[in-house]
Image (tube, rainbow, N blue to C red):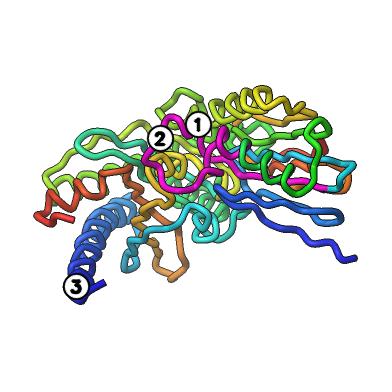
Amino acid sequence: MTQNRYSVDIAMMKLARPPDQLMCLGLGSCVGVAVYDLTAGLGGLIHVLLPSIEEFHQAGNSRTKFADSGITDLLQALLGAGAVKTRLRAKIAGGAAMFAAENAFPGNTVGKRNVQSCLDTLSRLGVDLAAQDTGGTKGRTIIFDVATGKMTVRMIDRSEKII
Amino acid sequence: MDRNSEQLNGLRDDILREIANIGAGHAAYALSALLGRPVVQSVPQVRFVPLQELAQTLGGAEKLVAAGLLSLSGDFSGCLLMVLDFAQAEKMISLVKGSPADRGEDGSELFGFSAMDESVLSETVNIMGGAYLTAISEFTGLTAVQSVPFLCVDMVGAVISVPAAESGKTGDYAVLFQSELFNDTERIMGDLFLIPNAGSCDLLLKALGFFP
């Protein structure tokens, strides 16, 4: 079987089965959230832009733009496709403060708030966090391998890291 | 959409393009004064870009760029973003200070640029942003103040996520006022973007007598 790699852009959600891989290119303050069930051979990835749908009611139609509603929808989609809730694990990466000092201007703190909202939502939904690579001031590209649950994290000035 | 509203939208787009034209024209003039050589701007584009397509619009999410950002607040808000190919950023630094950009191991955190080079880049962004903003303030009668410049060198997808998050608070697209800057040898120097926050685009239009 050929292996395909699918790109998950801002506010998108995609599910995949082995041997396919899912990736987010150039995550800055955004967070890539992968949730997977290794036994069922199923995984999904979302590309979160903002922390919470509660804050912004007039913000368009996309629920996967937000950490809280996005992760909730991702979980539902996985369960609907045959994943078992107790076997679900999550890995997250991203949430950097791109422009130097985090509090330098309003808007630069969004990465940190995104990460916190992802952690809160996962914990509220009872999904264990297996690993994370978050924060800092550098952008990340992530490639999530559905077969192994491994997430490869690339930065421009750091060697590749697998979480 | 009926014919009438199509014409109205055509007018709206013309007004928005004129705002970008005036702003970027002054910014290009300021840059050419700084560099001591001609800098011209392209015909600007004003686009409503879906958030998913932002990175692609800027040349692919993983493209390495140097970016300078000015946060705007006042009668209207948003940000001004200058995006340069990495090689063009080095070139701009060397043109401004008259000697090559020095990137050594002892450089700053900004991808090896020295503190001096970082200041040069910051000041260039500052001057161009000031010219852009002053021009559109005079044109519209609305004023906004700019923050100090913030720099980063990274993948363009990561850079754009900050203004994208602001735009994403109110919709699924961002408004991009895009102007390309060229130097005398016709090679592109960089892109200058005005990205207004929610409502600010309408405020600019209203200030010019167009009620969307």
Secondary structure of residue under mark 3: helix
- Which stretch is magenta? A42-71
Quadrant (top left/top right/bottom left/bottom right) for the C terminus of chain A: top right
Residue under label 3: B7
Give, as a three-letter code, the residue at label 3: Gln
Q: Are marks 1 and 2 on the same chain?
A: yes
Q: Which chain contains the residue that carries disc 3?
A: B
Secondary structure of residue under mark 2: loop
Asked if marks 1 and 2 touch (Cβ < 8 Å), the reply is yes
Q: Position of residue A108 (x, y in %)?
A: 47, 31
Residue under label 2: A56
Q: Please state which of the two labelled residues, at mark 3 or mark 2, is closer to the viewer.
A: 2
Rendered position, A152 above or below B182: above
Secondary structure of residue under mark 1: loop
Question: Does the segment drawn in magenta span residue A58?
Answer: yes
What is the quadrant of residue A4 in the picture? bottom right
What is the quadrant of residue A93 in the picture? top right
Q: Please state which of the two labelled residues, at mark 1 or mark 3, is closer to the viewer.
A: 1
Camera-side residue of B3 and B177: B3
Residue under label 1: A52
Give, as a three-letter code, the residue at label 1: Ser
Q: Are marks 1 and 3 on the same chain?
A: no
Asked if marks 3 and 2 touch (Cβ < 8 Å), the reply is no
Label 3 Cα crowd, 10 Å radius (few <14 / some 14-19 / many 20+): few
Q: Position of residue B186 (x, y in %)?
A: 43, 71
> What residue do we see at 75% from left, 48% from top?
A143
